Image: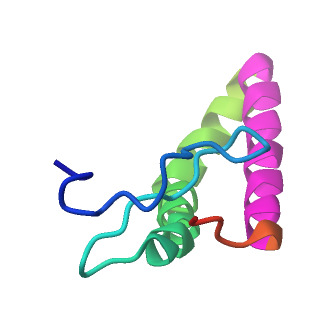
Amino acid sequence: MSKEKGWIASDDFIDDTGHQKCVINYPHLSNAEIFNSVEEFYNKFYFRPRYILRSIGRMIVDGEERTKLLKEGRQYLDYMRKRKGGGPDCS
């Protein structure tokens, strides 16, 4: 259905680094707008006070969980920094 309506901008779904590309274009929402909104969506989820407090609580009582969450936090920040540096790859 998406192809027939012309919403797919490319058949190349993965970039050179293995990340998904934003290839969907809706009439009211471009793939560049989708790409640029991802960071906002992630930040609204991960930086909620409830999520942060729950994560801190889990890290205090469980050393393995602390290691895991700190590693995931670094990966998230690195990923977002790379996304910003690379800009939208919406071809």
- Is residue 2 one of those drawn in magenta? no
Position of residue 57 in the picture relative to residue 28 (left or right): right
Whole-percent x, y for residue 60 in the image: 73, 32
Residue sitting at 32 percent across and 77 percent down? Answer: 29
Residue 42 x %, y %: 53, 59
Coloring scheme used: rainbow
Quarter of the image for the C terminus: give it.
Answer: bottom right
Q: Quadrant of residue 31?
A: bottom left
- Residue 80 falls inside the magenta stretch: yes
- Is 69 above or below relative to 83? above
Q: Residue at x 77, y 30 (%)?
A: 66
Q: Which residues are magenta?
A: 63-84
Quick check: 71 above or below 49? above
**Residue at the image point whose x is 36% and y is 57% from the top:** 8
Q: Is residue 18 above or below residue 67?
A: below
| Magenta part, dominant SS | helix
Q: Judge by depth and name the residue closer to the eye, 80 or 25.
A: 25
How many numbered marks have been drawn onto this rendered protein structure?
0
**Residue 79 image offset from top left, x and y in percent:** 76, 53
- In the displayed structure image, the side of residue 60 where residue 22 appears, left or right: left
In the rendered structure, the answer to whether residue 30 lies left or right of residue 4 reads right
